[in-house]
Image (spheres, helix red, strand yellow):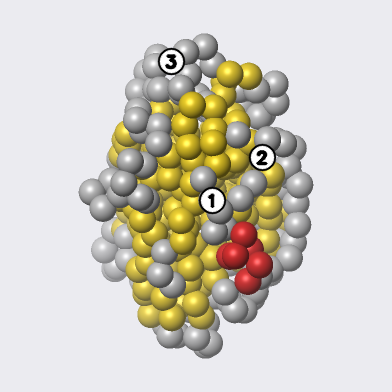
Amino acid sequence: MGSVRTTAFTATLLAAALSTALPAAAPYARADGAGTSARPGSAVRTVTQRVGHPAIMYPNRLYTVAAYCPQGTRPTGGGATVEQDPQSAVFIKDSYPDPADNGWVVRAFNASREVQTLHPLVVCSTDPSISYETGPDKPLQPGEPNNPSDASCGSGRTRFVVGGGIQAGDNTFASETSIGNGVWTARAKYMNFDPDAPLSFVRATAVCSTTESGYRASRTVKLPVGEVATVHVECPAGQVPIGGGGDGSPDVLLNSSAPTPTGWTVRATNKGFSNDDGLFAMVVCTAS
């Protein structure tokens, strides 16, 4: 399993994300990321990471940021980090690929009393088979934390999930955006508790490829009520992230989720009532 750390994001993490082109041969791997080997007939591809323009987030406002892939590549993963306060109450609403603009979009709400800075990142691949599939909109009642949406790349072993994202309605924030059992799952909590409020929703998007990649998950870290934790998972040696995300208990809301040059890091806050709630990070990896 990957390593775990419970430290805040720092400016060095953002600088490390400004990676150069990483040549990658597409792997065939077990689900635990072990025993990877080249898949017969797979083509050499290049994976890069790009940083978008940051947003200065004033309190109690929703902000949208995006990072874009260069021509000849397509987005496979992405997210955003928060620069300043490791305890900041910034919550992710959307984090998803935007094929029309060839980038990755993140929307987040600053629920803190301080000004924060949101930095978007995107993972880009030259894999020409990259495509996208959207899961169903799953309705959420006021206060509901757990009606996830799943997106798959179809039946059979011809297209594989290598990344994915989440979109949610107003006042609805991500608690999971991750891979498992051949699907990308998105889960969110609707934070409007008015019983007369309109329904909200959560929607998953899967990033698909004709080449399978292995994935890894960190161990689960428990979060006491009201506490914040940062969790990291590394790709195997010689591999780089192509997608990734995090999975918390239904009441554990994601503050940030983003790639590093060799793995994936997520931070989340326990907004529930149980000290047994937990969080883990996951990453989809490809050989370099």
Residue under pointer 1? 20
Which quadrant of the rendered structure holds the C terminus?
A: top right
What residue sits 31% from the left and 46% below the top? 71
Left or right of 74? Residue 85 is right
Residue under pointer 2? 235
Kind of residue indicated by mark 3 = Arg
Kind of residue indicated by mark 2 = Cys
Q: Is residue 88 visible?
A: yes
**Percent x, y of residue 128:** 34, 30
What residue sits 58% from the left and 18% below the top? 38
Count of numbered marks: 3
Front position in the image: 242 or 20: 20
Residue under pointer 3? 157
**Percent x, y of residue 217:** 66, 40
Picture layout, residue 258 above or below residue 234: below
CA separation, marks 2 and 3? 23 Å
